[in-house]
């Protein structure tokens, strides 16, 4: 059955789109690429809260590189000849030969951010920027083409309707419960780091900052603060004894094969947990060798100069957070020897990661934007939304609910290859595109 052929996203709001994409970050940009290459002619509209295309703006630090093979881009693993690949971008920027001479395994993060924008700009007519989605609901009026209910998406400016949804707003920030009441100017998530740093440069740097966490992001922020704000004392506060080296074994990285996604998805909940624990340090709570080496060198150099502007506070469990005297007072506990300490700083950066679906403290059962539609779809035994192998929510009861795809939110069900990374982005987008086509065209 034939549907609307690619109306401009600025067409009348009464348009019933075949698919609306919530968010236009890497996951839905990859879907736009997959859809373009399929040449299906279905209508797509993407809604993005930011004013324009961007990628990790809060962590675009000078000297930082990406953490995946650059050819694991929007399309190359699926179609190496595509015009949307990273090599095509380099060619268009007249930087291909310079890149080939680059004596580094990975390109700068700033370069890859420009690649993301370069691809996104090719779909500008399908995207409404500065449109923050505030609610998602289901309409009771059936779609004549599919017989299913339609999806209603409300932004701060308008309401749009579609036959299907690609939900890709990115994972929710993980803010430990103790810190939530203190969120604001003095306590913020690492995703906002660059904006806050620039504000400090203009309006005065804090005397002291605490960076919470021991991940790659935490160490990068520590080094960047030390270089950017030389008068600021940076406290690295983390529970572990030491920073952990990232597991970069090629055998571990076999988890980034599409076949591993099949294997993981078919495993039992107990096996999923065990498999995740075995490869966790390939992505979480760990740091690349070059970054750890740089931090240790910096600390050694500081010791030679009697410079104590970076302070490591390991084995430190934060037990209390209070806003005091224009700053933040942290109560710390060493769970091994029972000693306690108080740390007063001007600001706290939470390098505490993001939330996956699940029942643990750092997880969530459902993304907040899906709460209004969750009852129309099946749940797993732990209360999380059930997801098919093709990333689609499973309609409950009469099956009248429209197709909603979780694009980039299925690490709990599909494995670490579905984490916030480019590694399997192109394959996931191709699967979602095929499943959308099957849903919209019918048997």
Image (tube, rainbow, N blue to C red):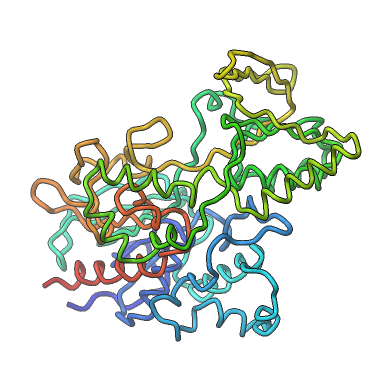
In percent of width and height, residue 59 lies at 64, 52
Residue at position x 36%, y 69% from top?
A: 427
Q: Is residue 17 visible?
A: no
Asked where in the image residue 61 lies, by quadrant, the reply is bottom right
Quadrant containing the N terminus is: bottom left
In percent of width and height, residue 154 lies at 38, 50
Residue 316 position (above or below residue 148): above
Q: Is residue 147 visible?
A: yes
Horizontal placement of 375 versus 431: left or right?
Answer: left
Residue 429 position (above or below residue 180): below
Tell me how many marks there are.
0
In percent of width and height, residue 422 lies at 47, 63
Nearer to me, 52 or 119: 119
Residue at position x 37%, y 74% from top?
A: 34
Quadrant containing the C terminus is: bottom left
Asked where in the image residue 384 lies, by quadrant, the reply is top left
Nearer to me, 284 or 361: 284
Residue lying at the far left of the rendered structure: 398
Nearer to me, 9 or 386: 386
In percent of width and height, residue 355 lies at 43, 41
């Amino acid at each position: 059955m034939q549907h609307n052929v690619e109306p401009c996203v600025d067409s009348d709001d009464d348009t019933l789109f075949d698919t609306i994409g919530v968010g236009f970050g890497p996951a839905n940009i990859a879907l736009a690429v997959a859809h373009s290459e399929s040449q299906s002619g279905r209508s797509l509209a993407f809604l993005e809260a930011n004013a324009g295309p961007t990628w990790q703006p809060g962590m675009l630090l000078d000297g930082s590189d990406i953490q995946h093979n650059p050819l694991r881009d929007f399309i190359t693993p699926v179609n190496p000849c595509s015009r949307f690949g990273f090599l095509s971008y380099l060619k268009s920027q007249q930087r291909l030969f310079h890149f080939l001479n680059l004596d580094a395994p990975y390109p700068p993060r700033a370069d890859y951010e420009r690649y993301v924008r370069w691809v996104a700009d090719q779909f500008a007519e399908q995207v409404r920027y500065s449109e923050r989605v505030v609610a998602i609901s289901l309409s009771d009026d059936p779609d004549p083409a599919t017989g299913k209910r339609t999806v209603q998406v409300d932004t701060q400016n308008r309401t749009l309707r579609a036959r299907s949804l690609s939900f890709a707003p990115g994972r929710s920030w993980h803010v430990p419960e103790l810190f939530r009441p203190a969120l604001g100017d003095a306590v913020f998530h690492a995703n906002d780091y660059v904006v806050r740093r620039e504000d400090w440069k203009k309006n005065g740097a804090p005397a002291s900052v605490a960076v919470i966490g021991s991940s790659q992001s935490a160490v990068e922020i520590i080094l960047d603060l030390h270089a950017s704000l030389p008068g600021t004392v940076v406290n690295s506060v983390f529970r572990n004894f030491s920073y952990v080296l990232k597991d970069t074994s090629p055998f571990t990285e076999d988890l980034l094969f599409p076949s591993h996604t099949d294997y993981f998805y078919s495993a039992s909940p107990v096996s999923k947990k065990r498999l995740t624990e075995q490869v966790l340090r390939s992505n979480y709570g760990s740091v690349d060798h070059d970054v750890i080496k740089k931090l240790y060198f910096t600390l050694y150099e500081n010791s030679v100069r009697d410079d104590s502007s970076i302070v490591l506070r390991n084995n430190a469990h934060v037990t209390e957070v209070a806003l005091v005297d224009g700053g933040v007072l942290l109560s710390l506990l060493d769970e091994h020897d029972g000693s306690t300490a108080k740390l007063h700083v001007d600001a706290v950066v939470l390098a505490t990661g993001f939330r996956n679906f699940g029942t643990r403290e750092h997880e969530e059962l459902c993304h907040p934007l899906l709460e209004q539609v969750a009852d129309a779809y099946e749940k797993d035994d732990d209360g999380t939304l059930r997801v098919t192998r093709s990333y689609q929510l499973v309609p409950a009861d009469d099956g009248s609910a429209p197709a909603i795809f979780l694009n980039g939110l299925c690490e709990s069900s599909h494995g670490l290859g579905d984490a916030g990374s480019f590694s399997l982005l192109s394959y996931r987008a191709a699967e979602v595109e095929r499943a959308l086509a099957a849903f919209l065209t019918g048997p």
